[in-house]
Image (cartoon, grey):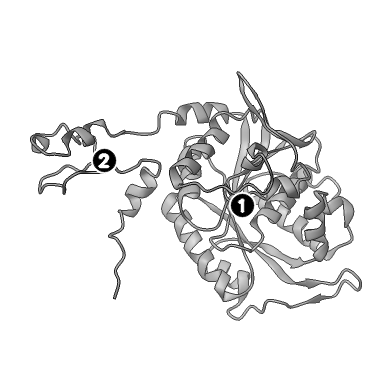
Amino acid sequence: MPSLEEPEPVQEVLSHPLKQKPELVAPEPEHCPGPESEQAGTADSCAGCPNQQICASAPKGPDPDIPTISARLASVKHKILVLSGKGGVGKSTFTALLARAFAINPDKNVGIMDTDICGPSIPKMMGVEDEQIHVSNQGWTPVWVMDNLAAMSIQFMLPSRDQPIIWRGPKKNGLIKQFLKDVLWGELDFLLVDTPPGTSDEHLSVNTLLRESGIDGAVMLTTPQEVSLLDVRKEIDFCRKAGIKVLGLVENMSGFACPKCKHTSEIFKATTGGGRALAEEMGIPFLGSVPLDPRIGMSCDYGESFFDSFADSPACDAIKNVVKGLARQIGVDEKEVLLDE
């Protein structure tokens, strides 16, 4: 039976996710302090080791840019991650809808940071796909969708929308750091972080770089079927290990809302109880269910606000209920968010 490479200790990965292990030229000796330890290359046991110079020159300690990031984001009141673990459950769509909902109040400033480096969807969904980033000696200016809604994505930096991103982890981590350190976010009430599926480089980077400035927590997204819930359980466990508060779970694509008769039909059967049962099982808040409505996809394709275009949709009401629940979780008066309620 094939075996995986021996995993690194979980706490070591969570504490130093951006640190690259040095490439050693010889096996570690018996009393080696560890190539990533503070004593690496300088301990008595390192004398005469072929790896001594490599270990001594390896970066150590916390990332020196974290204080700069914390200062840059000091005027951002609430930072919310959108996570799932599973691909295709609608994280980017939900992030776009959530941003539009928070931006209903013209006095609230909202930002979206798209950390899905290889599959950036936010620019298309927000109707700013052809925009570019303005760079000055002060930093990068995000693209403004509305007077109170800004977005930052790698898509704004590509020569064409069909250009693929073929990057390894360290380069992705570097760009995410720039999004936090160099972007002129200004005074924001909400910064929403759209993430790719999984529990890997991008998630570790965001958590580490934002930890000092404070993360309100993460919203979990799932679809009703067990094949999605399996990966969401892993994501919830990741958050608990990483010290990220789970603000709640949203069941997306929960039935089909017919645009004609408004009747909702079950498309993806919840064979094990769906999102509500998972929330109870894991002891986290259930924020609500959002039905399928083909007009959500159409709004995202055209970069329009679903709330403005299809206010009569059952999905619109469902999303607003989710937003109310999320507002309560982060200590915001829901009436300040949804002015029309």
Q: Which residue is drawn at 52% across and 51% down?
A: 245
| Percent coordinates x, y for residue 153 in the rendering | 64, 41
Query: Please, is residue 290 above or below residue 272 in the view?
Result: above
The numbered dot on residue 119 is: 1
Query: Please, is residue 205 above or below residue 225 in the view?
Result: above
Q: Which residue is drawn at 32% across and 33% down?
A: 61
Left or right? Give the position of 124 relative to 114: right
Q: Which amino acid does label 1 sit on?
A: Gly
Disc 2 vs disc 1: Cβ atoms closer than 8 Å?
Answer: no
| Percent coordinates x, y for residue 156 in the rendering | 67, 38
Left or right? Give the position of 104 relative to 57: right
Question: In which quadrant of the rendered view does residue 258 lie?
Answer: bottom right
The numbered dot on residue 65 is: none
Name the mark nearer the viewer: 2 or 1. Answer: 1
Query: Please, is residue 257 above or below residue 139 in the view?
Result: below
Q: Which residue is drawn at 40% across and 33% down?
A: 63
| Percent coordinates x, y for residue 50 in the rendering | 13, 39
Left or right? Give the position of 293 relative to 96: right
Crowd rating for badge 2 (residues with CA inside 10 Å; few <14, some 14–19, many 20+): some
Query: Which quarter of the rendered picture does the N terminus lie within?
Result: bottom left
User: Which residue is the site of mark 2?
Assistant: 36
Query: Please, is residue 248 above or below residue 168 in the view?
Result: below
Q: 320 or 202, which is in the foreground?
A: 202
Q: What residue type is labelled 2?
A: Glu
| Percent coordinates x, y for residue 332 in the rendering | 68, 44
Label 2 vs 1, first from the N-terminus: 2
- Whether residue 139 is visible here, answered yes or no, is yes
Tag count in the figure?
2
- Whether residue 334 is visible here, answered yes or no, is no
- Secondary structure beneath dot 2 equals loop
Q: Which residue is drawn at 89% across and 61% down?
A: 312
- Secondary structure beneath dot 1 equals loop
